[in-house]
């Protein structure tokens, strides 16, 4: 009996160490303060949204919301897995306060959108990779709007037909509400947007023809929730 238990413990230890040594990449979507200065960190990877425990310590790498990291996971029975061996995979624009704040706003919204899930399709990780690269050379609000339209299409929530979600009638002069749902201006009491430019955005995932005022309108809609 003792030998069987010893063998089982050795096998469990081996499995834990294998998991611990497996390096992954992911984006930090949320950070919550735990006891003392420890943290609970939610990390999005290609396949999963992990909830991990991060112990505070002077030798630990600095982490922040929206960071892309290399990391490993240490499993511990009865407790949250630990976030270990963190390496920050930075982007040059993170030193730009304006771009960083907009990026973090979108990251917070994405976390709220995905937080009830564990198993995640690779689309979301790939979307953030694409967005991070685009922000390097592009206006961040325009880049976020383009990627958000891709997400709506992927999730089957992009309404290209311009039928009002309130009265279910076709729209000549549309406006948009949360989740970019199209509506008549008189049904929701908002100003019209250009149907031609919105149709181009929805078809090509390209915001180049939207003026700055329209970009601000769409950005404020995104801030209402994904």
Image (cartoon, grey):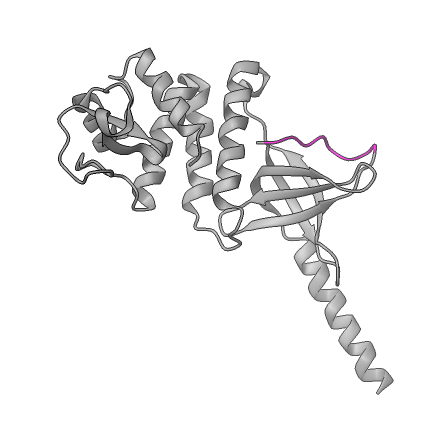
Q: Quadrant of residue 75?
A: bottom right
What residue appears at the point 66 percent right and 42 percent down from the top-left corner? 41
Viewer-proximal residue among 200 and 213: 213
Question: Horizontal and vertical percent for residue 176?
Answer: 29, 28
Image quarter where the C terminus lies is: top left
37 displayed left or right of 202: right
Q: How many marks?
A: 0
Which residue sits furthest right?
2
Is residue 197 one of those drawn in magenta?
A: no
Residue located at (72% from left, 59% from top)? 17
Q: Is residue 53 above or below residue 185?
A: below
Give the image location of residue 110, x and y in percent.
48, 37
Q: Does 165 sit left or right of 146 as displayed?
A: left
Q: Position of residue 98 (x, y in %)?
A: 53, 15
Q: Is residue 42 or residue 138 the one in the foreground? A: 42
- Could you tell whether 107 is left or right of 146 in the image? right
Q: Quadrant of residue 181?
A: top left
Magenta stretch secondary structure, dominant: loop
Residue 197 horizontal/vertical position (percent): 20, 21
Region in magenta: 58-65
Q: Residue at x 63, y 49 (%)?
A: 51
Quadrant including the N terminus: bottom right
Taking depth in this image into account, of 154 and 220 the one nearest to the observer is 220
């Amino acid at each position: 009996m003792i030998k069987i238990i010893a063998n089982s413990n050795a096998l469990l230890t081996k499995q834990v160490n294998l998991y611990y040594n497996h390096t992954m990449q992911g984006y930090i979507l949320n950070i919550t303060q735990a006891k003392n200065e420890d943290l609970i960190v939610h990390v999005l990877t290609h396949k999963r949204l992990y909830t991990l425990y991060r112990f505070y310590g002077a030798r630990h790498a600095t982490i922040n919301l929206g960071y892309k990291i290399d990391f490993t996971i240490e499993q511990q029975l009865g407790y949250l897995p630990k976030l270990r061996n963190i390496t920050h995979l930075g982007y040059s624009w993170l030193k730009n306060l304006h771009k960083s704040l907009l990026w973090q706003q979108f990251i917070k919204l994405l976390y709220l959108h995905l937080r009830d899930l564990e198993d995640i399709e690779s689309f979301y990780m790939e979307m953030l990779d694409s967005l991070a690269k685009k922000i390097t050379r592009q206006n961040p609000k325009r880049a976020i709007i383009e990627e958000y339209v891709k997400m709506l299409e992927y999730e089957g929530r992009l309404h290209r037909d311009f039928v009002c979600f309130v009265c279910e009638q076709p729209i000549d002069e549309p406006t948009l509400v949360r989740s970019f749902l199209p509506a008549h201006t008189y049904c929701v009491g908002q100003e019209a947007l250009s149907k031609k430019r919105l149709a181009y955005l929805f078809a090509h995932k390209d915001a180049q023809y939207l003026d700055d005022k329209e970009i601000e309108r769409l950005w404020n809609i995104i801030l209402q929730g994904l």
